[in-house]
Amino acid sequence: MSILTLSRRSVLSGSAALMASTALPARLWAQTPAKGGRLIVAADSEPRNLNPAMVASNGVFFVSSKVVEPLAEAFFDGKDGLEPRLATSWEGSDDGLTITFKLREGVMWHDGKPFTSADVAFSALQVWKPLQNLGRVVFKDLEAVDTPDDHTAVFRFSKPTPFQLIRNALPPLTSVLPKHIYETGEIDKNPANNAPVGTGPFKFAEHKAGEYYRLEKNSSYWGKDLPHLDEIVYRVLPDRAAAAGALEAEEIHLAAFSAVPLTDLARIAKVPGIEVVTRGYEALTYQLVVEINHRRKELADLKVRQAIAHAIDRKFVVDTIFLGYAAASTGPVPVNDKQFYTADVPQYAFDVAKANALLDEAGYKRGADGNRFSLKLLPAPYFNETRQFGDYLRQALAAVGIDAQLVNNDAAAHQKAVYTDHDFDLAIAPPVFRGDPAISTTILVQSGIPDGVPFSNQGGYKNEALDALIAKAAETLDPAARTELYWEFQKKVAEDLPLINVAEWGFISVARSSVKNIANNPRWVVSNWADIWVDS
Amino acid sequence: MIRIRTLILRRLVGAIPVLAIVSVGGFFLLEAAPGDAVDAYVAGIGGDAQMIDELRQAWGLDRSAAARLGFYLWSLAHLDLGQSVTFSRPVLDVVLERLPNTLLLMGSATALSFSVGSLLGLFAGSRPGNFRDRFLSIGSLALYAVPGFWLGLVLTVIFAVQLRWLPVSGIETIASGKQGVERGLDVARHLVLPVASLGFIYLALYLRVMRAGMAEAWRMDFVLAARARGVPRRRSAVRHVARNALLPLVTMLGLQSAAMLGGSVVIESLFSVPGLGRLAQEAVSARDTPLLLGIILTSAVMVILINLVVDCLYALLDPRVGASEASA
């Protein structure tokens, strides 16, 4: 098990270890799983809607992915990096207009009704395409779903749609809902949104607001001899110090999503019976990005943007803010993405002298007070690290004569200021890379996005060549050609700097050593946990 | 008794404008905060422009602030607190679910700080200026200077993590199936640390008010007269001095109930107690106006009721109070 639990030193020794670990096969040891028992995990929030088919977000998946399953799950090794769930095979046509899914037979909904292709057709057309936050983009050209028999679903698209994109979108975007429960009444008012019914290894048992969620074993689960656990309980622990304390006091088994702050990890890793695990988040990479308002005259100048990129010491950010639990970025696709990443892009080494020279060249001389110009810097409040990077960036910019005024807001105020009112010059955002640039990455630089859309290009940046490239990649069917277009995309973004990618990170889990089979797929924390067990 | 009945009636009528001011004020304060409930929601999950528009319509946020305030007050006049945006449930249900936990926490903490504080104050004030008084006064001041969350964390590390005598957090053991007395004991065990963290801080106030009151009372004529009559010091400390010093303490009790509501926000988050304070914090960050106003109104009602009880107590303890109101 030492393979799973990197010590702090080995993580610090280089982000290479973190990234290389994604290539390790999942189940390297054999131990007979113990049956039964209750797993208690920390949850830091209670989503208002627990329906993963409508709200594709990690906070929702954390609980609901054990109850409602997607067509396929991400996998470290295996064809297309996928493992079958409700679909057993998937086949795309050469013209990009149809995809045929063979569905698993003998699967029952938690209420005892059989799972069929009608459920998939209903979910795709009534939920993913019209209602889901991410599906509205990926499935926008989905026209019909044919159901020739109970275990075949044929997706028909009105425009050629890359099979590669749909495949990459299967784990996060295709949670299947029971048609018989959702077909009457409004979908977004269905009581099952807060007490989900699915086909997963666990049934939703109860939610006591402010206290806990409880899931119970689904004894008629389709997976042979699965799940191992009798119960999963999510204890709501909004305070981060409380999560660490509860782990040490053995009140909970697991705190995921970096619920234990990075600064506590060194100490808690030394506690006997507790392990710090960095794997299991490879497909949920968060990126630390400086968003730029190109409406500002100074920032519309490429030289100024290059100067800012050169002013940031990425190594310092990784080592000091993320305490080594991150990697420096080169562009808009994270280093750990095996399909699309390319290192062949312009790089901006930390070089204060060069940054100063570029700013001088751009015509922004230092004034009497040593400042060239002032700007407003808005760090996103969602993570400690985004706020800390705001403090760092202010200092880094001061070193090159740019006076950054920090404006700290809470989530709602930040969303309004940056994405609706555009009342910022620089902002710090933590967008997520979701396995394919077309899902939620190209939107960060693409033009023509209406005001108010979060995690999108609201900086007024417009580059027709880049827009054309994004549009072309969206309809290129050949995976190799499509991947090449995204290499070009990465190069162009790094060249023209519509935004500046600084670092990328996955979350950290802290678990009691008695919890087995953790972190065994790239979306482990939001996967179904059928095989997790507790060694008593 | 007529005196007290008049007092209660007057206070209750007076409460109506107070509540109106509190709800309108709360509405505008939250309105002044940038961003609305939809902003807070999509900041967490993302979404496109159409989805955002649809949400604004569904949650009634596409209307003007005046229209929403009017609608809210109209519902309020019909004793309807409205729907919570984040919970998609009636505000009253959500609030009533959390209220008992907060009352339990606040009530226990108030009882702890009042009883221990006044008792220690009695010790300190029985001989003002001696070693015992100095020690207690300085000790309580030190305790008062400690932030509640820090005290909570330290107590947790010692008693829950190291010694494992008490649970780290929560209001009761999760899904334990305990009933009756067993459940009560379980809740009591969970309350020890949060009540101690909240109560110990306010203890200092009661101690100091009691001590100051007693120090002053020692110099009063009737006490001097009693001492001159040969009443033993210990006896006059309790019967004459402490009894007089108790009145301002009762006033403090009413005032502190509001302060304790504020303190419970921090303590409830720290100990994961599902109470009103934590709910208020969540309502603010989610910009859930109906829910926040519901919590503010509930808290205002609570403070008004507590002060009413205090006033009645006062009237019973001190015949002068309320006499003017009754005769007016």
Image (spheres, coloured by chain):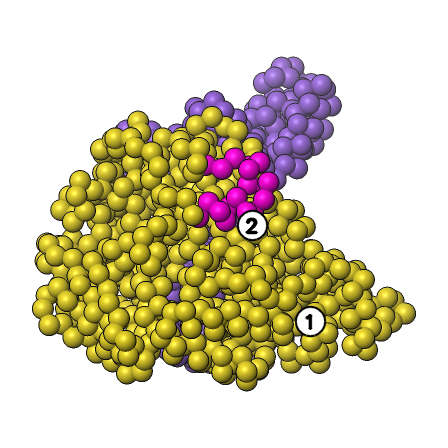
Name the residue beneath numbered marker 2: A326
Looking at the image, which is closer to me, B189 or B17? B189
Residue B310 visible to the viewer: no
* B269 to the left or right of A185: right
Q: Is residue B159 above or below residue A339?
A: above
Chain drawn in purple: B
Looking at the image, which is closer to me, B287 or A115? A115
Find numbered disc 2 in the image and state the secondary structure of the residue it sits on: loop
Horizontal and vertical percent position of residue A21: 46, 45
Spatial distance from mark 2 to mark 1, Cα to Cα?
23 Å
Name the residue beneath numbered marker 1: A305
**Label 1: chain?**
A
Q: Quadrant of residue B148?
A: top right
Q: Quadrant of residue A445?
A: bottom right
Q: Amino acid at mark 2?
A: Ala
Horizontal and vertical percent position of residue B99: 38, 49
Residue A402 included in the magenta stretch of the image: no
Residue A476 visible to the viewer: yes
